[in-house]
Amino acid sequence: MIYNDDNNPREDCIFLRLKHATRKKQRGKGCEPHQMVNFLRDFRVLEKRQHARGEKGVTYELFTRLMERYHSRFQPSEVEYLCNAFDDDRDGYINSERFVRHFTGLNERRHKAVLRAWMAMPKDANGNAQRGHVSGLFDSTLKQKSIDKEQPLAPLQDAEPDDQGD
């Protein structure tokens, strides 16, 4: 996940396998999305422990052990590839902000879109948006989408056959 987060197919494939394995942590119980929350919580606990020890963050080794605890099965080259994808400084530590954004589905492009939308939103003197205004914008977006779907398609005009006989 390089800086602009234009993931290549291999990154996406490996990362999706991690997310799938995380949801399936407890074998036989089906897909459990709350396991993703548990994984993120465990990641943050590791990060806090590392900071308390004076470390920069979660190391590759700790990250790998965490993935294994959630039944992620990767080849060593895939683990290295995944760790490198979240190591912005190339110093052996996972960039937690980038990892969490990717894990929750908010890549750099989406993150920038959210920031642009936030900047355009009217706010009070403290920089807070009113909940009613945000809800109203969301509701109006949903209504517009449903209106767009209900509009009938323009009737097809009788087309003249082209010169090639098609």
Image (cartoon, rainbow, N blue to C red):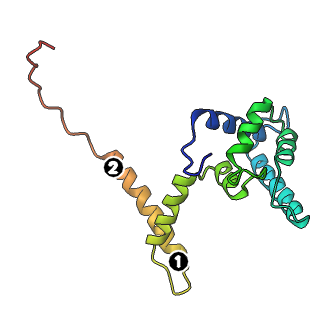
Circles 2 and 1, Cβ within 8 Å, touching? The answer is no
10 Å neighbourhood of mark 2: few (<14), some, or many (≥20)? Answer: few
Could you say where residue 160 lies in the image, as x and y percent from the top left? 8, 23
**Quarter in which the C terminus is drawn:** top left
Could you say where residue 149 lies in the image, as x and y percent from the top left? 35, 45
- Amino acid type of the residue that numbered disc 2 sits on in the rendered structure: Asp
Q: Which residue is mark 1?
A: 130
Residue 94 tag number: none
Task: For marks 2 and 1, give the CA distance.
Answer: 27 Å
Q: Is residue 162 left or right of residue 91?
A: left
Residue at the far right: name it.
Answer: 53
Residue displayed at 66% across by 54% down: 98
Residue displayed at 83% across by 42% down: 64
Residue 156, above or below 160: below
Residue displayed at 85% across by 64% down: 51
Q: Is residue 67 left or right of residue 98?
A: right
Residue displayed at 83% across by 39% down: 25
Q: Which residue is mark 2?
A: 148
- Amino acid type of the residue that numbered disc 1 sits on in the rendered structure: Gln
Could you say where residue 72 lies in the image, as x and y percent from the top left? 80, 35
